[in-house]
Image: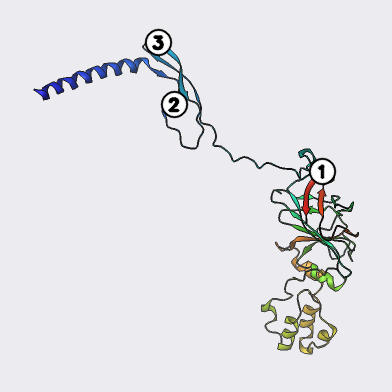
Amino acid sequence: MGKIFWLIFIIIMAVALHGAFTELKGGVKFENLSAIFKFPSGLKRATTTLSISVGGKNYANVNKPAAISSPNQPPKPTIIPPTGFSLGELSPFYGQVELISFSSGNPTSPSRLTVRSGASMTVPVDIREWRVEGNRDVSILIPGAVSDYIPSGLASESNLSLSKGETVNFYSNYSPIGAGLKLNKCTGYLNNTAKFIPELPKNCPAIYDKAEIINFSGTCQNLITSIRSCAAPTPNQINSIPKPDESQCRSILTGRTTYQSCYSRHRNDINFFSKEWLVWVQSAMNFDSSHDRLLLFDKGGLLVDEYVY
């Protein structure tokens, strides 16, 4: 008897639910079905209203989720100006160019100030005519430099355009070629014709390929392989060239050990240029040798960076 009762009850409920569903199917309208979807975690969910029509009657101001907003972005870092400066006194290049070190000179070596590109740099920045000031009313003006020093030496100073990943070392003394320059694979040969202080790095390419000298005499090969990077052969080395090999040895020993010959052979190499500049400001850097606060200003007099030591 109990089973029959529950069977009759289930049938009655099914009929009732079917009738209710049929009525709702014809009379309910959702203006925005996206409201029924579940929002992914981490997305901001706002609410607005939903209008529903049931059986010809309108119901307004029913809460429903609004459109999904963008995920929260990490806040931009707050810029705190150095002591004594306001945000309005900061250069557009603030953070793009950095002062990173200073070393005071002595009677045998010049003072050195080092500047490099900053983490936020995206395009090259011309730092010519920028200024560095210290605490004791001492300042230096950044000159131009030669970005591509041609063998004739006729290139004049131009803008000092600092690119991402590059460094500039400024020295207080004079340039023996009358200008600062961007280093390249061959600039080490310039030490042989001018006295640079400090000396230019000696990292020149090899003057020979092993395959082209393999059939030379042992004496000739020893002479060629004994030449140090960026060095020129001595008169004694030239005079010791064996007669049978004279033309072959001489063409390599004298024809490939100059800045001009190196430049001609390697100028189109992808990695020909270094990421380092050497620039001589030709004036004393009388910043305090122990402790100072150096400030870098752009052409407009706005602060680019500070370095405290």
> Residue, x 68% and y 84% (percent of image)?
215
The mark nearer the N terminus, 2 or 1, is: 2
Residue 176 left/right relative to 232: right
Q: Is residue 64 above or below residue 300?
A: above
Question: Where's residue 217, x and y in %?
Answer: 71, 87
Is residue 305 or residue 14 the one in the foreground? 305
Q: CA distance from mark 3 to mark 1?
A: 68 Å
Q: Of helix, strand and loop, which one carries label 3?
A: strand
What's under tag 1, amino acid-wise? Leu
Q: Which mark is residue 302?
A: 1
Q: Of helix, strand and loop, which one carries label 1?
A: loop
Is residue 187 or residue 12 the one in the foreground? 12
The mark nearer the N terminus, 3 or 2, is: 2
Number of numbered markers: 3
Q: Residues within 10 Å of mark 3 (few under 14, many from 20)?
A: few
What's under tag 2, amino acid-wise? Ala
Residue 242 left/right relative to 12: right
Q: CA distance from mark 2 to mark 1?
A: 53 Å
Q: Which residue lies under the disc numbered 3?
A: 57
Quadrant location of residue 204? bottom right
Q: Nearer the viewer, mark 3 or mark 1?
A: 1
Question: Where does the N terminus fall, quadrant-wise?
Answer: top left
Q: Residues within 10 Å of mark 1 (few under 14, many from 20)?
A: many
> Residue, x 74% and y 81% (percent of image)?
224
Question: Where's residue 279, x and y in %?
Answer: 84, 60
CB atoms of marks 3 and 1 within 8 Å: no
Residue 125 left/right relative to 285: left
Q: Of helix, strand and loop, which one carries label 2?
A: helix
Q: Which residue lies under the disc numbered 2?
A: 35
Question: Where's residue 132, x and y in %?
Answer: 84, 52
Q: CA distance from mark 3 to mark 2?
A: 21 Å
Quadrant location of residue 11? top left
